[in-house]
Image (tube, rainbow, N blue to C red):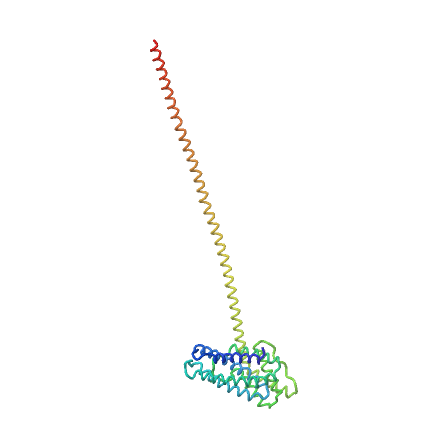
Amino acid sequence: MDAISLLKNDHRTVEELFKRFERAGDRALPQKREIVDRIIEELSVHAVIEEQVLYPVARATVPRAEDMVLESLEEHHIVKWVLSELEGMDPTDERFGAKVTVLIENVRHHVKEEEGDFFPMVRRSLNRSALEDLGEALDMAKQSASTHPHPRSPDAPPGNLVVGAISGVVDRVGDNIEGLRQGGMAAVQDLIARILGGRPAGAPTGSSVTRSRANDVRRTASNAADGVARTAGSVRSGAAATARAAKAGAKSTASTAKKSARATGSTAKRAATTTGRTAKKPAGTTKATAKRAAATTAKRSTATRSTAKPSTTKRSTAKRSTAKRSTKKSAASARGSRS
């Protein structure tokens, strides 16, 4: 996204918050507090990235932009004071609503001038590639910009290092617009290249005077921007190291979990095998015991039948002998009676 589109998107976001505040009822105090907190955050970040990136580039590359940039910085200063007061104000305060209304009016005026006059000047002065590079620089600045207003701080901390260096060179070598334009753009592109790891800008073109002025601007701005680039490089290296450490930690955790799962599976398998063997042994023992008990019972039954049979035979023999003797007696009695 190019720089102008990114900044206009910020304006649309803030305008929607303004409309939400204006639509909120008188008793919607918690909602109004929440909306104002969002407004403070959005405007604080937007002001920082314009002051650190956009305004330095415009002053270095856009003809007749100096006065407009200085006016914009003063408007930012006023807005940041109002934001700092709203940040610590209770929504029940009688001046809370009035202060937000004044803030909205000031910001809308600022946006109208930027989009109506300033942004078209920037777009005419920079080509599409430069605007894309500038958009990337603005987006990067957003990631580290403060979300709270600081009205007592300098208007353009790191970014104005480039502006200060360019101003010093212009005072010495004169007002060569083409040399200033080429040198300023090269300085900005060099800074972006250092931050993003891309290629630096090419050599300036034109007359010897133009090339000399451009190289002076570029060299001085480069010296001023070294600290910014080193800081950005350190942050980037730290983020990469953190990412590598997180990846290594995740890999180690996954490997440990995998090993634990394998160990648990092996333990469960051994336990199941042991349990099966243990269960099989009692079953075999029980079967053998039952078999032995059945054999013993059968032997006892056979012995009992053998013991009982002789007694029965003896009783039968005794009965036959008694019957035989009774028959003999009866025959003898019969013979005696016939005699």
Q: Is residue 97 left or right of residue 189?
A: left
In the rendered image, residue 16, in percent from the top left (x then y), is placed at 51, 79
Where residue 248 appears, x then y in whole percent?
A: 52, 66
Q: Quadrant of the C terminus?
A: top left
Q: Does 253 sit above or below residue 318?
A: below
Residue 137, quarter of the rendered image: bottom right
Q: Residue furthest right?
A: 207
Q: Is residue 324 above or below residue 165?
A: above
- Can you give x and y, in whole percent of width and height, for residue 223 in the image? 56, 83
At 60% from the left and 76% from the top, the residue drawn is 198
Q: Is residue 189 left or right of residue 38?
A: right
Observer able to see residue 54: yes
**Relative depth, front residue between 296 and 301:** 301
Picture quarter with the N terminus: bottom right
How far from the left and from the top, in percent, is residue 245? 51, 68
Residue that appears at 38% across and 23% down: 316
Q: Residue at horizontal 51%, vertical 65%? A: 250
Find residue 122 and report its image quarter.
Answer: bottom right
Q: Is residue 147 visible?
A: no
The mark tally for this picture is 0
- For the residue pair 3 and 320, the one nearer the viewer reads as 320
